[in-house]
Image (spheres, grey):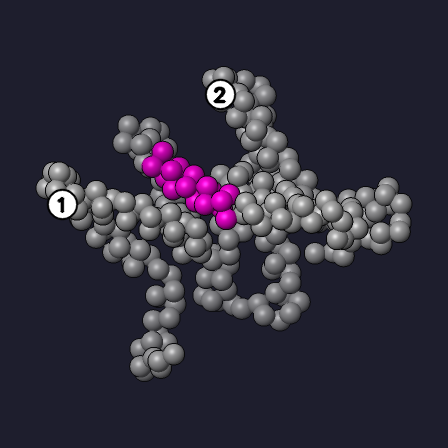
Amino acid sequence: MAPPPPANRPLGERFMAIAQTLQFAWFGGHLTLLLCVLRYGISYFFMRYYSRWAQFSYRTAFVAAAATYGIVVYKAYRARMRSGKAQGGTAAAIQFASDENVQYLGETPCSVKQSSTRFRYTDLKPPQTALSESIGKFVKGYYDTSMTLVAVLEIGLFFRILGSVIILQKGAFLLLIIYSVFLRARYAQSSFVQQVVAQAGSRLDVYAADQRTPPVVRQVWEQAKGLLHRGVELTDIRRYAQGPQQSSGPKKAQ
């Protein structure tokens, strides 16, 4: 992140200095994404999905999301190259795929996540102002809540796509495969997604253990839970990456 310009310079000069940085482009893209999602939400609420403004907002939101996360991925890659920590081969591919920003670059339904970053961009103002302190407290106070909401929406979108597959909607099966890969990566990287999944699983366990629950429902849930656990194990990239290392000898206790 570029250092903020000196506070004793005029506001116009400070703004022009920041407007020429990638950080400002990142901020502008995120803000554009948030506004476009809100505008498309209005069209969706009034069931005007195919209006000119709805289509413009939808397409602009995807372009803005791709641009902003592309900037973050580029800056992270450039930082690793400069520090000499960049890896090659399989390790580099795993490191690249496990980057949260790379995952969101591939899948962009993350507008809620932008609201928590919107208030972090305060370089136009001197540090330690009352406004910046209030913004900092607001972000810290609502960050966990907003990230939990993002996790719920990500999981809910999976079932939305699954419903499209059930009704045989065109292109839904391919979209389900792509989004399943994204959601599996999010589960591996996000403690919020793991927490939401664990809470949902606990509630379903309680429901299945109820004596009033039909045995067929209980059996279906147990089978589904077993398949999910097996699927998580089989799709764990770290398991395959660490396989040769584990076979060399017993792992020391830590």
Q: Position of residue 171 (x, y in %)?
A: 37, 33
Residue occupying image coordinates x 57% and y 29%: 38
Q: Quadrant of residue 220?
A: top left
Q: Quadrant of the C terminus?
A: bottom left
Q: Is residue 49 visible?
A: no
Q: Which residue is mark 2?
A: 45
Q: Position of residue 156 (x, y in %)?
A: 38, 38
In this rendering, position of residue 37 left or right of residue 178: right
Please tell me whether residue 18 belongs to the stretch shown in magenta. no
Residue occupying image coordinates x 64% and y 35%: 32
Residue occupying image coordinates x 28% and y 48%: 201
Mark number, residue 202: none
Q: Position of residue 168 (x, y in %)?
A: 29, 29
Mark number, residue 219: 1
Secondary structure under tag 2 reads helix
Q: Main secondary structure of the magenta part?
A: helix
Going from N to C along the chain, the mark reached first, 2 or 1, is 2
User: Which segment is the magenta one?
Assistant: 144-160
Judge whether 53 appears above or below 143 on screen: above
Q: Quadrant of residue 31?
A: top right
In this rendering, position of residue 82 left or right of residue 153: right
Q: Is residue 2 visible?
A: yes
Q: Are marks 2 and 1 in contact (CB under 8 Å)?
A: no
Residue at mark 2 to residue at mark 1: CA–CA distance: 39 Å
Secondary structure under tag 1 reads helix
Residue occupying image coordinates x 79% and y 50%: 126
Q: Quadrant of the N terminus?
A: bottom right
Q: Amino acid at mark 2?
A: Phe
Q: Quadrant of residue 85?
A: bottom right
User: In terms of depth relative to the viewer, which is nearer, 1 or 173?
Assistant: 1
Q: Residues within 10 Å of mark 2 (few under 14, many from 20)?
A: few
